[in-house]
Each structure stands twice: as structure tokens, then as C-alpha cells.
Image (tube, rainbow, N blue to C red):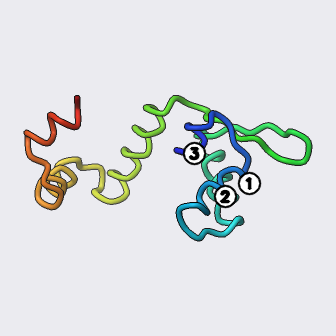
Amino acid sequence: MKIVWERDSSTVRDVYETLLERRKVAYTTVMTMMKILEQKKYLKRTQLDRAYVYRPAQPKRLVVGAMVRDFINRVFNGATEPLLVHLVEEHDLSPRNWKKSRA
């Protein structure tokens, strides 16, 4: 999603080549993930010649919010408190650091 947001639109090949600069990844994995994101209505696609072009279907803040809610539901059974406790205990999330990250 980050790559598509940065570029505003991307093909699977565009995303694949960008990810390859960072780590080894299979083309089919990228294609599968983009199809899943489309099924979840995070991406929409149009056909251009022989390739599909993917664009964000929703604003970034809405997608991130939905992904965070999904994560909290799956990992913490919908409770936010265990996530916050984990962040405070494991990732030095002090009030001082929290204020910096919100600026």
C-alpha cells in the first residue's frame, strides 16, 4: 500500500521492482497481495494495455485505521488496552516520546 500511495498508481511490476530494491520477494507474492488488497477494497484497478494499474481506493488514514482495527481484533480480541501495554513495555512509549511522535 505504501508504494501505491507514494506513486498514486502502480502496476504489480512497479511494486515488485520497488520491493526488490529492499528485499527478495517473488512476483507472484506481490500479485497475490495486491489482489487481496483489491478484494478488501483498499485498491481499485483498471486495465491499461496488458497490465492492471492499481490506485488507492480510499484515503490513507481510512485504510490505516481499518488495518489497525483488523489487527486489534485478530491479535487482541478487539481490546486496545493489551496493545497499549505492549507498546509501553516493549517499545519505550513514554509520554515524552508520544508527544514527539504526534508533532
- Along the line of sight, the residue nearer the viewer: 53 or 77: 53
For the C terminus, which image quadrant? top left
Using the rendered view, name the quadrant where residue 19 is placed.
bottom right
Q: Which residue is mark 2?
A: 16
For the N terminus, which image quadrant? top right
Using the rendered view, name the quadrant where residue 25 is placed.
bottom right
Which class describes the residues within 10 Å of circle 1: few (<14), some (14-19), or many (20+)?
Answer: some
Per the image, label 2 sits on a secondary structure element best described as: helix
Residue type marked 3: Ile
Q: Residue furthest left?
A: 95
Q: Which residue is mark 1?
A: 13
Which class describes the residues within 10 Å of circle 2: few (<14), some (14-19), or many (20+)?
Answer: many
Looking at the image, tell me whether mark 3 or mark 2 is earlier in sequence order.
3
| Relative vertical location of residue 56 with respect to residue 17 in this rendering, above or below | above
Q: Which residue is mark 3?
A: 3
- Along the line of sight, the residue nearer the viewer: 31 or 70: 31
| Relative vertical location of residue 6 with respect to residue 74 in this rendering, above or below | above
Per the image, label 1 sits on a secondary structure element best described as: helix
Label 1 vs label 2: CA separation?
Answer: 5 Å
- Along the line of sight, the residue nearer the viewer: 82 or 60: 60
Q: Residue furthest right?
A: 49
Looking at the image, tell me whether mark 1 or mark 3 is earlier in sequence order.
3
